[in-house]
Amino acid sequence: MSKLRISLTILLLPLFSGCAAIDAFLFDAYPDGTPITQERPQQVEQVAPAAEESGGDAALRDEAAALREELKQQQAELEALKQKKAAEAAAAAAAIKEQLWVRIAFRSGQTAVTAQTRRTIKELSNKFLAQPRTQTIEVRGYCDDEPIGGYSGKQRSAHSFDSQVALSQARADAIAAEFKKAGIPAEAIHAMGFGATDFIADNATVEGRNKNRRVDIFLVEK
């Protein structure tokens, strides 16, 4: 090889090397010149906030749903509390409106009023008439749970009534009649029989049945 050719080769070699580097740079880069092997900061900044915003919206929706459910439960509890307070107020008003005055016991199957009971009713009537009243007298008759004719159904009754309601009504009427004899106006007295209801003691014992066979006398506000 001549000295001239060798000299030309040496001069052109850096030029070819530079072109190869330029080609590699152009074909391994994004249009803006950023190498493909590197992340583009602009794209990362655009995508990351969008993802974060989507997750935040979902969290807010869940929190809002939870708050709505909690509010719904609180409203239900408040309504239940209002109803309870209204029921308690009604019960208190009813208790104030009527007052148990006296309780009179009866023997099994009996409707007759004893001499002691007559004296008691006379005393109560005098107290009732001693001052102006805005009350009426309610006489409520009750029985124990023993059926007419006994539990076996074969016992002879000391009365002619065929039901406990009728028997309790007769007891209430007998007490009401004594109040009328003692001077209480008929329009101020109301008598009603309730039969075998509103027990105040256990019917499984003799003592309990004796307590349940009774007439309750109430003073009731008009």
Image: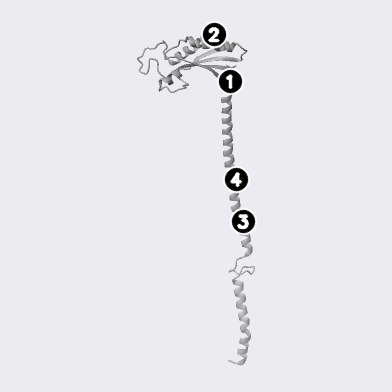
Residue at x-position 62% and y-position 57%: 49
Q: Earlier in the sequence, mark 3 or mark 4?
A: 3
Q: Which residue is mark 1?
A: 97
Q: Nearer the viewer, residue 183 or 123?
A: 123
Q: CA distance from mark 3 to mark 1?
A: 71 Å
Q: Earlier in the sequence, mark 3 or mark 1?
A: 3
Residue at x-position 57% and y-position 36%: 77
> Are there few (<14), some (14-19), or many (20+) residues within 10 Å of tag 4?
few
Q: Nearer the viewer, residue 14 or 108?
A: 108
- Estimate the x, y position of residue 93 in percent, counting from the top left: 59, 23
Residue at x-position 58% and y-position 30%: 85
Q: Secondary structure at mark 1?
A: helix
Quadrant in which the N terminus is drawn: bottom right
Q: Earlier in the sequence, mark 1 or mark 4?
A: 4
Three-letter code for the amino acid on which mark 4 is drawn: Ala
Q: Quadrant of residue 47?
A: bottom right
Q: Which residue is mark 3?
A: 50
Q: Which residue is mark 4?
A: 64
